[in-house]
């Protein structure tokens, strides 16, 4: 027999910490964290966006995930990083769903 899970609605302001976390870091800081994280890897090794978010804020890192993914897209369009899913490169201009990984791009381009 299937079990259904009922989740209580989020308390007012429950996402305030996430919103505050993403506002503390500008795009340049997030881009630098992505590139620094990838610089510690030997190509073609990759990194999870959560590693970048944790580097920026070890406590409230979840609130940074959307900002890290958005900045990864900007860097991917510029060719500085490659966004992958299941080991295959994703088009940075197309919508993404699900888990992604980041790896150094083919060029040293930056936005």
Image (spheres, rainbow, N blue to C red):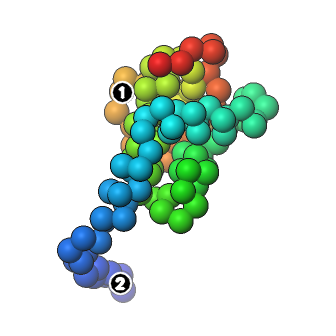
Q: Is residue 47 left or right of residue 15?
A: right
Name which residue lies at 72% across and 32% down. 39
Residue 46 percent across, percent down from the top left: 67, 37
Is residue 22 placed above or below 82 in the rendered structure? below
Residue 50 appears in the figure? no
Pointer 1 local density, CA inside 10 Å: few below 14, some 14–19, many at least 20: few
Q: Residue at x 32, y 56 (%)?
A: 19
Q: Nearer the viewer, mark 2 or mark 1?
A: 1
> Where does label 2 land, which residue?
3
Quarter of the picture holding the N terminus: bottom left
Q: CA distance from mark 2 to mark 1?
A: 36 Å
> Residue 69 placed where, x, y %?
44, 40
Instruction: Find residue 36 and report its horizontal and vertical position in percent.
Output: 66, 35
Check contact, mark 2 vs mark 1: CB within 8 A. Answer: no
Residue 41: quarter of image: top right
* Residue 21, placed above or below residue 82: below
Q: Secondary structure at mark 2?
A: loop
Which residue is labeled 1 in the image? 94
**Residue drawn at (62%, 32%), measured in percent from left and top?**
35
Query: From the viewer's perspective, is 88 left or right of 93?
Result: right
């Amino acid at each position: 027999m299937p079990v259904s899970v009922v989740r209580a609605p989020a308390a007012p302001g429950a996402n305030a910490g996430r919103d505050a976390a993403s506002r503390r870091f500008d795009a340049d800081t997030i881009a630098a964290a992505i590139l620094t994280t990838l610089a510690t890897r030997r190509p073609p090794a990759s990194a999870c966006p959560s590693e970048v978010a944790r580097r920026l804020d070890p406590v409230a890192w979840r609130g940074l995930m959307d900002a890290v993914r958005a900045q990864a897209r900007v860097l991917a369009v510029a060719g500085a990083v490659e966004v992958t899913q299941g080991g295959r490169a994703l088009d940075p201009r197309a919508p993404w769903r699900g888990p992604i990984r980041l790896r150094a791009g083919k060029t040293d381009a930056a936005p």
